[in-house]
Amino acid sequence: MALEVYLVRHGKTVFNKVGRLQGWSDSPLLAEGKEAARALGRALQGKVDFDAAFCSISPRAADTAKIILEAKGQADLPLSVIEEVREYCFGSFEGDLVQNVHGLIAQHRGFSSIETWFEAYRTGTHHMLAETVSELDPLGLAENEAQFMGRLKQGLDILCQKSPVHGKVLLVSHGMAITGILKLIDSQSTLYKSVENATVSRLWFESGRWKIESIGENLSI
């Protein structure tokens, strides 16, 4: 089996713009988010033909995937949902302001400012954000690191099961989920920091092993 996976973060949404956490919640793509997905599709036209296409269960991911496929001339390619590659679940903090939540985390972890917390989190050796949010969530709905990363691993396994034996595959997912997938393949490959919206991280799967070819490419430039 040999697969080349084009792992794309969804286009920019209303919550991205106003600085609110989305997680398992959703908000619609902005006009600029739709245009970025359209530009990516046009950039891929004539350069790659997808043999399969997947997205998370979130509408913002499905809408992005459909726009990409339509813009590159593959609107008829079936789009399959892999629920396991949806974004991290923030539990009680879904929809809250990003700065508010990170302020709570910084205080809980004993950091002097949000900036020092961000530095520690992004360069950390494990998913401190997931672990802290799961500790702080009064409803106990937020995922811890093991739950989040385990789910993403299942998502990759499902992708392989549903994909052709050989070919090129589109997968539209989310910021934290993409970081998690990259960390699963190579823990040193990236910081705990999301790639930009509508960018591509190219993965290669062969002989039971994953390899990262690129991270966060803006192919529409």
Image (cartoon, helix red, strand yellow):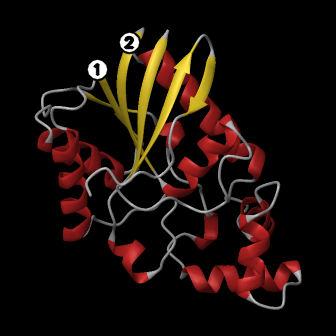
Task: For the residues labelled 2 and 1, say whether their Cβ atoms are less than 8 Å apart.
Answer: yes
Disc 1 residue type (three-letter): Asp
Residue at image x 44%, y 34%?
82
In the displayed structure, 97 sits above or below 186; it is below
Image quadrant for the C terminus? bottom left
Q: Position of residue 105 (x, y in %)?
A: 76, 78
User: Which residue matches tag 2?
Assistant: 164
Marking on residue 96 = none
Residue 11 drawn at (x, y percent)? 32, 59
Amino acid identity at mark 2: Pro
Q: Is mark 1 on a helix, strand or loop?
A: loop
Vertical placement of 91 versus 15: above or below? above
- On residue 51, which mark appears? 1
Nearest the eye: 120 or 156: 120
Dot 1: within a 10 Å radius of its alpha carbon, few (fewer than 14), some, or many (20 or more) residues?
Answer: some
Residue at the (54%, 60%) spot, across then down: 194
Q: Which residue is drawn at 18% across and 61% down?
A: 35
Say if 207 sits above or below 130 in the image: above
